[in-house]
Image (tube, rainbow, N blue to C red):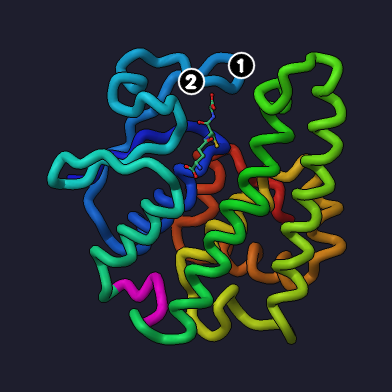
Amino acid sequence: MYKLYWSRRTGAFAVDVALTESGAVFERIEVKRSNGRVDDPEFERLNPMKQIPALVLPSGAVITESAAMVMTVADSFPEARLLPETGTDLRAQAYRWLLHMVVNIYEPDLRYSYADRYTADSAGVAGVKTAAAGRWGWGFRAVEEGLGAGPSWYLGRDFSVLDPYLAMVVCWHYDTPALLARSPKIAAICKRVLARPGMPQLFQRYGMGDLD
Ligand SMILES: N[C@@H](CCC(=O)N[C@@H](CS)C(=O)NCC(=O)O)C(=O)O
């Protein structure tokens, strides 16, 4: 049985979708936080990086990094077809865009949300936040432009783990309605993710309902 350590509005959402879509048997264990920061000695022993999510595999191995988790789940349940065939161009595109979201969207979000961690000068916090917001928008623009002429899903014809990952980072934006208004292709994908069976409940569980 998999164990997913989760909390609202965290990367656990995309992992939860991957596990749910693949039909995996898993347990959700909520991590305690205060002021947005992990405050849970038991979880900190499991993941000394003190970051949510963490995934415990059936073997007992502990995995951190949300992107590594969704790729691991996709690999473990190939029949769910959550990633394109290994060795294909489309699989390479999947790696490319998943890493793009981690590096150029998730990371600026963390810089924006925890700006004090990214400067040794307390007077610099506002500047870090402003620069992070700019970089965050740049990351989303690259996705919107990279999507081409209105594909159904991020990778084209088929749903993949990239779709809930995209919807998740969109929900975290400081102004999701404005982001969606200027990104019609991203907005269309988010709507389709939300329309999948069981998804409205999952978005609600994770406190991420602002896609309409
Ligand atoms: N690169 C990591 C980032 C994990 C991360 O920073 N998670 C945030 C929540 S989305 C967190 O744990 N924040 C609490 C903290 O840093 O104190 C991943 O993709 O899993």
Say which quarter of the image contains residue 9.
top right
From the viewer's perspective, is residue 20 above or below residue 185?
above
| Image coordinates for residue 60, horizontal then vertical, percent | 16, 39
Camera-nearest residue between 187 and 196: 187
Camera-nearest residue between 45 and 53: 45
> As drawn, is 28 to the left or to the right of 91?
left
Asked if the magenta segment contains residue 79, the reply would be no
Badge 2 amino acid: Val
Single out the residue that lies furthest toward the left: 59
Asked if the magenta segment contains residue 81, the reply would be yes
Residue at 13% over, 45% down = 59
The dot on residue 35 is: 1
Magenta-drawn segment:
80-85
Residue at 31% over, 59% down = 73
| Image coordinates for residue 30, horizontal then vertical, percent | 39, 28
Q: Is the CB of mark 2 within 8 Å of ligand 1?
A: yes
Residue at 26% over, 75% down = 79
> As drawn, is 17 to the left or to the right of 37?
left
> As drawn, is 104 to the left or to the right of 91?
right
Q: Secondary structure at mark 1?
A: loop
Q: Is the CB of mark 1 within 8 Å of ligand 1?
A: no
Mark 1 packing: few (<14 Cα in 10 Å), some, or many (20+)? few
| Image coordinates for residue 44, horizontal then vertical, percent | 36, 20
Q: How many marks?
A: 2
Residue at 41% over, 50% down = 15
The dot on residue 38 is: 2
Badge 1 amino acid: Asn
* Residues at marks 1 and 2 touching, judged by CB atoms closer than 8 Å: no
Predominant secondary structure in magenta? loop
Q: Secondary structure at mark 2?
A: strand
The image quadrant where one finds the C terminus is bottom right
